[in-house]
């Protein structure tokens, strides 16, 4: 899972999967807890997607996690690719401190390097990469196409670019509350603008990458802790978008009847785009691909069809 928040005009709202931009350090602990809980409860997608990466690039030596946040994606990649060093990039020093501690506890601290950088600035000093991973971070950037071009240039030929986005915010509140019928749908609508993103396929291709596949994953679980934590965040962040009666109903649900959420299912839907950098000079749809910068070795690597395994 991946990234954090920001409020500049090109960004939307903070959500449960963000790790890159943070407006204030005081939000870090709140967001970090939600990110870790999201990975614990709805993290089955990580197993699936890191497995796909391992199938396609089992020999990966360097993986770059853009917008690494608390490191759930970083750690999953480090575990799945036991010979790789994972470079975790994030703007927030507090998040990176937390990530380093988690990596040490997980026994992979020696293969995780943290890099504090704002992706709206120049590409960070990651070195050449075999995999660039961006989970719920691209749509927060002022110029994601520039970042994807930089990612292309950082990748070795045959290297993978993996982009993950939430298709909609997690839905947790029921619609059948006696005093607030339809509340769950209205809360979902209020948070629906928080994670808007385009189809990244054409963007990846414009950056010179070859799109191998697009995968859609749904994760569902029952966990009252997650439901209460997420709804408390919705209450804080979206109260101006809710009718007063819905705010009151949400308050009652959270303060007077929190156990009602213990049996409420939580569902999250994600889309995953997988692309690779072709060999220098290879034509992609009639156009010659961008060549590697001088400091990126042009060691050939096998390409793959990107299908789920």
Image (cartoon, grey):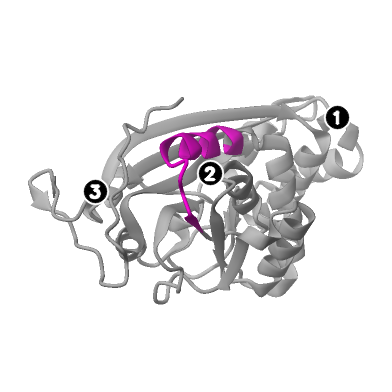
Task: Mark 1 and mark 2 in contact? Answer it, CB < 8 Å.
Answer: no
Task: First in sequence, mark 1 or 2: give its number.
Answer: 2
> Tags 1 and 3 in contact by the CB under 8 Å rule?
no
**Which of the numbered marks, if any, corresponds to residue 260?**
1
Q: Quadrant of residue 123?
A: bottom left
Relative to residue 58, is residue 301 drawn left or right?
Answer: left
- From the top left corner, tell me how far across and down residue 134 is, in percent: 47, 53
Along the line of sight, the residue nearer the viewer: 110 or 268? 110
> Could you tell me which secondary element the residue under label 2 belongs to?
loop
Magenta residues span: 46-64
Residue 65, horizontal then vertical, whole percent: 52, 57
Relative image position of residue 36 (x, y in whole percent) = 72, 49
- Compared with 142, 158 (above or below) is above
The CA span between labels 1 and 2 is 23 Å
- In the rendered image of this protein, does residue 47 appear above or below residue 134? above
Mark 2 = which residue?
A: 192
Whether residue 17 is visible, yes or no, is no
Q: Quadrant of residue 151?
A: bottom left
Q: Residue at coordinates 31% horizontally, 63% vertically from top-left?
A: 297
Which residue does the image show at 64% across and 45% down from the upper left? Answer: 79
* Residue matched to label 3: 278
* Relative to 138, 22 lies left or right: right
Task: Determine the CA span between mark 3 and mark 2.
Answer: 36 Å
């Amino acid at each position: 899972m991946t990234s954090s928040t920001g409020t500049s005009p090109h960004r939307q709202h903070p959500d449960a999967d963000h790790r890159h931009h943070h407006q204030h350090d005081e939000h870090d602990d709140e967001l970090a807890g939600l990110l870790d809980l999201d990975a614990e409860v709805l993290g089955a997608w990580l197993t699936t997607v890191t497995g796909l990466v391992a199938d396609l690039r089992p020999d990966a030596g360097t993986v770059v996690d853009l917008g690494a946040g608390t490191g759930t994606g970083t750690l999953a990649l480090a575990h799945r690719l036991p010979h790789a060093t994972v470079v975790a990039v994030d703007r927030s020093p507090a998040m990176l401190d937390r990530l380093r501690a988690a990596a040490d506890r997980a026994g992979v601290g020696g293969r995780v390097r943290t890099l504090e950088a704002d992706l709206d600035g120049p590409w960070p000093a990651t070195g050449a990469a075999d995999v660039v991973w961006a989970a719920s971070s691209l749509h927060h950037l002022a110029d994601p196409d520039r970042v994807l071009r930089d990612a292309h240039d950082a990748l070795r030929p045959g290297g993978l670019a993996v982009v993950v986005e939430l298709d909609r915010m997690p839905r947790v509140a029921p619609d059948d509350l006696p005093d607030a019928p339809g509340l769950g749908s209205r809360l979902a609508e209020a948070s629906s603008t928080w994670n808007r993103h385009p189809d990244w396929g054409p963007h990846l291709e414009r950056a010179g990458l070859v799109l191998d596949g697009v995968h859609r994953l749904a994760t569902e679980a029952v966990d009252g802790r997650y439901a209460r934590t997420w709804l408390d965040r919705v209450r804080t962040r979206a109260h101006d978008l809710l009718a007063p009666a819905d705010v009151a109903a949400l308050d009652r649900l959270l303060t007077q009847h929190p156990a009602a959420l213990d049996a409420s299912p939580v569902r999250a839907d994600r889309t995953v785009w997988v692309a690779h950098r072709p060999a220098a000079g290879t034509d992609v749809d009639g156009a010659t691909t961008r060549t590697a910068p001088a400091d990126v070795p042009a060691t050939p690597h096998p390409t793959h069809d990107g299908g789920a395994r």
